[in-house]
Image (tube, rainbow, N blue to C red):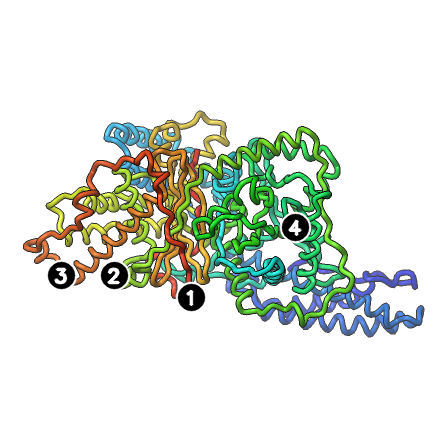
Amino acid sequence: MPVLDQEPSKGLQSGDVNMYFTVHIWISSVHWKMHERIKCFTNNKGCMVFNYRLLDFYDILLEEMIHHTLIKYSLFLSQFTNSANSCCQQVQLHLYAFKIRKMLELTQFCMSRTAQALPKLPLPALRDTLEMYLRCMKHLLTEEQFNKTQHVVQKFGAPGGVGELLQSKLMERRDKQANWVYDYWLKDMYLNNRLALPINSSPVMVFPQQHFKAPIDSLRFAAHLISGALEYKTLLDAHALPVEYARGQLAGTPLCMEQYYRLFTSYRLPGPERDTLVAQESSVMPEPEHIIVACKNQFFVLDVVINFRRLNERDLLTQLEKIARMADSKEERLPPIGLLTSDGRTEWAESRSVLMRESTNRDSLDMIERCLCLVCLDDASGLELNDTTRATLMLHAGGAAKNGGNRWYDKPMQFVVGADGCCGVVCEHSAFEGIVLVQCTEYLLKYMIGSPSKLVRAASVSELPAPRRLRWKCTPDIHKLLASSADRLQREVNNLDMNVHKFNDYGKEFIKKQKMSPDAYIQVALQLAYYRCHGRPVSTYESASIRRFQQGRVDNIRSATAEALAFVRAMTDGKLGTNDAEKMEMLQSAISAQTKYTILAITGMAIDNHILGLRELAHELKMEKPEIFKDEAHLISNHFILSTSQVPTTVEMFCSYGPVVPNGYGACYNPQSDHIIFSVSSFHESSQTCSAEFVKILVQGLLDMRDLCNKCNRGSNPTEQRQGQKLERHTQTDTKWQSKPPARPTDLTKNRQTPPQVLLTTPGQTKAEAQTQTSSEESDGDSKERK
């Protein structure tokens, strides 16, 4: 049990009349009653678990304590003063604050014990990982490369060798820590990465296009959004979010919830060599409790709690109107300091150290880093808005010439409200996975749809203090740093090649009718698209949730399987000896292989985290780097040219992110019942990639796979088809999908057509897929090139 307050001291005098007297009166009896009833709320192992009956019981006891305390206190107070009523009202506020604190203590204690009840992440056997590593890499390497790799792996895993030593050390680490790979993974995936956060690391959720008729409409939208965010934070503060359970494969397992509690309480602190994920300690009434509003590249402090009361929507709108007027004042406008956060992490760390030399800047940085979240009121971009444009603007804000300085990329949650209706969320990814972002934003959108605006009915706090503009003292050095950051951001803006496409021919319902996993099916389609574009398979990343375990984040599903390669070759290379029935068998084999590896990943038995742990432990022990980690295969295996992620939603929105390597693609997809939304990104500077061409080929591949399924389902049986069925092929397949990879035309960028705008309709919430558990729980484009 949490430690409760001790009994009050005796011999109180009139000067001792204060909060400490009131909050101690009945604690002893409450504590005793809790011990009497605690057995009702333990599991069969004697471990207390989270239980709402326990909270109800504690709530009743605290109410009883408050009631009797106020009676005693009023009688006691009447001996010394004639203003007992006003004093009692003040004390009542303190008592209820005390009650909230005690309820939170108990809730947090119960939740922590529940989290501890989750199993630890298992450690795969070294032999299993090494064998799977060779199977995953064989078809991605030349024969010469594979022979060398096979020799290196055998040496690493030999009895008494380096591999066994590192494995034994990892086993010791697993016994001592809640999650043996978490710290290694967090540093490798995010904190060690020196690339700028926009495009390279921070995913975005793109909201439906809004149609604001006047400037006040965007502020109303922002006020409503903030109100919803505060409601969600209230749930987090009370630990009232219900524990989630796994769906799909191995359904029903409770999932780790700790990522949710970093939504509004963390930030990423830049460092010269490695960043730090700072998680602030939660408290009942933080001082101050505020958000930061960015408007015209200026930052304003908006307190959301004033006089112990949370601002209602009318108050929030009033404050936002004040901020908009203050931001319009050109005389007080300050340089766009937010641009510095868009820079590379080492560059931003150096710039931050320059800013910190001035006390004014230190105060402003402190207010931003401790805020709950950012709300970015963007100016209209002046661009024609379609889904591709809106995704692009969410990722980089249009650069310094548009809203690039209207961001602070270190904060986990930045809600963007554009005057032109371009709205969404920018996420700093180190604190949590995509499922947390999706669940939070879905809550907000459903809140805004289901909760009418309360701008008129609610009572307001009188005489609201004006929001405060954050000040910056900018030296010539800072101005130079700002210019450099602006230039680098503009290069990123010019380099991004984004294409968002809504595939309308079918969705996951058609795929499920084929008795196939929608996620595995789409992954095979992505393999087909890349092979048709480039004539070879490549290392592929798909994130898989490992939240079944304590502090679980993700591992990698290696989608470029040998079975997928056999299928895409049969669909591409035009071998006349392969008929439709054989292709169908290959497709089913590819999907089966994908699903089997998915189960390995979600049960903690995949290879990527294990190999990472072995490598990092060798470095930690100051060993000479083992040959397996210097081998060319290791570099190829972690150069994720295809970075993929399924991010399904139940409301109208979609996710986007950038590629993780210079010659790669970021491919995010949102499967719905009758359509699939694809968001594909690449870099213009790479002569090997083109997002529009990839999407075009992906669409054709999906149509070919549908036709194959339909033909085979209509056929009499596979044997008859093998013996006598005449092979049918699309004309385009005969003429285009040959083994030689198509060259990228030199003028492809100039002739690229703008895809049709994705017109989303709000999908109904559907049952989770029964055949796969992948990133439908946590898939968020968090893949990267491991170095």
Residue pointed to by mark 1: 765
Quadrant hosting residue 336: top right
Quadrant hosting residue 66: bottom right
Q: Earlier in the sequence, mark 1 or mark 3?
A: 3
User: In percent of the image, x 47 and y 34: which residue is there?
Assistant: 617
In 3D space, how far apart are the residues under numbered discs 3 and 4 (Cα atoms)?
62 Å
Q: Could you tell me which secondary element the residue under label 3 belongs to?
A: loop
Q: Which amino acid does label 1 sit on?
A: Gln
Q: What residue type is labelled 2?
A: Gln
User: In percent of the image, x 32 and y 29: which residue is there?
Assistant: 152
Any mark on residue 514, and which?
A: 2
Q: Which of marks 3 and 2 is nearer the N terminus?
A: 2
Q: Earlier in the sequence, mark 2 or mark 1?
A: 2
Q: Which of marks 3 and 4 is nearer the N terminus?
A: 4
Which residue is outermost to the left? 724
Any mark on residue 292, and which?
A: 4
Q: Is residue 484 left or right of residue 553?
A: right
